Image (tube, rainbow, N blue to C red):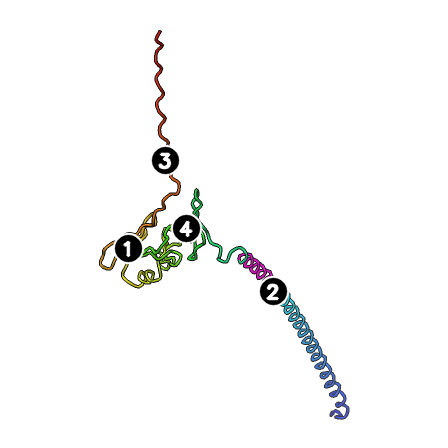
Amino acid sequence: MQSDPSSAAPAVLSAVLAEVLRTSAQLAAAEAARTLALAAAGHLALDVMADRRANNRASEMALHEVTSELAAAENLSDRTSPLPWDRVVTHPVTGAVLHIDSYHRGTAIDRFLRARDRHCRWPGCTVPAIRAEVDHTHDDALGGATEVSNLAHLCQRHHTQKQFTRWRVRQVPGGVLEWTSPTGRIYTDEPLAYSPAVRFVPDDPPPPEPEEQPAPF
C-alpha cells in the first residue's frame, strides 16, 4: 500500500522546523556564552589596567619621594660644603689634617702645606708656595694618597719637569723630598725650619744655701 506524498509533507516540514529551532537555540546559547566570555574578559582587562594604573601611581609616588630625599640631601651638601663629603683623618693631639679620602684637598691641608713648604720644593727653586701648585709626590692615578706625607708644592715649570722627564722623587718622613736625576744623582730638599720667636730655656740652678757656722761660744 502506497502512502500519500501530500500527507507526508507536513511531517517533514515539522521535523525540519524543529531542527532549525533546535539549531537556532544552540547558536543562541553559544552566542550568549561567547558574549559572556567576552564580557568577563573585558572586565578582567579593565581590572588589570586598573591595577597597573594603581601600581604606576604607587611607583611614581615612591620615585617622587626618593627624588625629593636625594634633592634635599644634595641641597644640604651644597649648603654645608662646596666639596663632596669625605673622611678626614686628623692628628689626635694637634688636630692637624693628616689624610683625606679624596683627590681634592681641604683648606686645612693647603694651609699646612703652605706653612711647611713656603716655596717650590724643587732643589734650589724659590718660587713662593702661593704661586706654586700642590702635587702628589706619588701620582694619584697610581694609588698615591691625598695626605700631607704625599703632597708638596711645585711651581708649574718643575711640576711639568717631574711629570714628563726622567726625574724621580719620593717623600720621606718630615716632608723631605729626595730627587733622583736622570744620571742617578740624588738631591735632597728639606722644609725650612722656623726660628722660634720665643725661646724657653731652663732656669739657672739656685745657688747653694750657705752652711751654718757654729756659734763661737
Q: Earlier in the sequence, mark 2 or mark 1?
A: 2
Question: Residue 158 versus residue 169: which sits nearer the camera?
Answer: 158
Q: Secondary structure at mark 2?
A: helix
Q: Earlier in the sequence, mark 3 or mark 4?
A: 4
Q: For the residue carrying disc 3, how many other residues have a C-alpha within 10 Å: few (<14), some (14-19), or many (20+)?
A: few
Q: Earlier in the sequence, mark 3 or mark 2?
A: 2
Q: Position of residue 7 (x, y in %)?
A: 77, 90
Is residue 74 rendered magenta in the image? yes
Q: Which kind of residue does numbered mark 3 sit on?
A: Val
Q: Position of residue 24 (x, y in %)?
A: 71, 82
Residue placed at 35% from the left, 62% from the top?
156
Q: For the residue carrying disc 1, how many other residues have a C-alpha within 10 Å: few (<14), some (14-19), or many (20+)?
A: many
Which mark is on residue 201? Answer: 3
| Label 3 to label 2: alpha-carbon separation | 74 Å
Residue highlighted by disc 1: 179
Part of the protein shown in magenta: 56-77
Q: Comparing marks 4 and 1, which lies closer to the viewer?
A: 4
